[in-house]
Amino acid sequence: MKKGFLIDMDGVIYRGSELVPGADKFIKALVDNDLPFMFLTNNSQRTRRDVATKLWRMGIPVQERHIFTCAVATARFLAQQKPDGTAYVIGEGGLLNALHLNGYSIVDHSPDYVVIGEGRTVTLEMLEVAVQMIFDGAKLIATNLDPNCPTKDGTRPGCGATVAYLETATGRRALGIGKPSPIMMRMARKELGLATSETIMIGDTMETDILGGVQMGYRTVLVLSGGSKRSDIDRYAYRPDVVIESIGEYGRSPQRLEELVPTMNRADDSTHDLDQWRKAN
Ligand SMILES: [Mg+2]
């Protein structure tokens, strides 16, 4: 049976700028064996090309098509909801680029959406402008709701923290697009051309990677090379299918990891028979 992987990056492939030992071999084996895979990241700062270049420099030979960011998911979602719309953006190049590629204009007054991404450029003035726009009717969109991000020196506030500020100030709730939202999780699977039963999500974070995979009915693999410890798992009402120390353990044969993952019921892939449903109702 065909299977493919959606793979988180930070904590799975690298930590900060340091490669997880053996992760490069794992990815190279996926490429060499022609197994479908895509990196799934909640970081909206970089474009697909920027991320691919960062990985190349770490010795991981991937193309732009292997990268799927929450910025891309957000821009495509907005283009479906409101083609040729306008956005006020608090974010960086990856988000601005994705919006432009999907027919959006970046404006500084009367936007359709206020879109918040990851970034280091946010100022109190920008937040003030965004608050007023939301009161005037702009919809609040978050590329992701991660409260913070690990850095090599500790932790910095994430996109979710900026969003919480705006939610508190306006009393409106944001729509989050990145993991664990089904919007991004489903979009990535479709782009890879996989069915639900063929999709395996690998990540280091229970609240995003594993929850997102569980919600979609994907098989899930938690790696302990990032932010989670084995003892953390019991705190959650959902579980990953498989827990491993690191994908580095499967460096030369990703097929061994595939074999660990339980087979899934193909019935999950069937489409609804609308006619039958109508007759029955
Ligand atoms: Mg991670």
Image (tube, grey):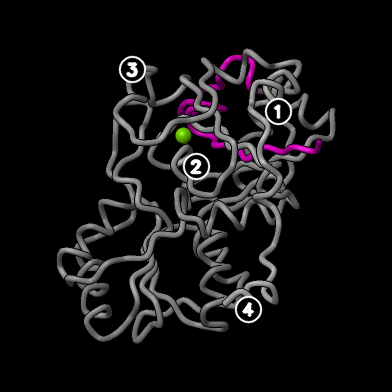
**Quadrant assignment for the C terminus:** bottom right
Residue 47, image x, y percentages: 58, 53
Q: CA distance from mark 1 to mark 2?
A: 23 Å
In this rendering, the label closer to the viewer, 1 or 2: 2
In this rendering, the label closer to the viewer, 2 or 4: 4
The residue that disc 2 covers is 214
CB within 8 Å, label 3 to label 4: no
Q: CA distance from mark 4 to mark 1?
A: 46 Å
Q: Does 90 sit above or below residue 66?
A: below
The residue that disc 1 covers is 27
**Quadrant assignment for the N terminus:** top right
Please tell me which of labels 2 and 3 falls first in the chain.
2
Q: Secondary structure at mark 3?
A: helix
Residue 55 vs residue 3: left or right?
left
- In magenta, the rendered stretch is 1-23
Q: Nearer the viewer, residue 221 or 9?
A: 221
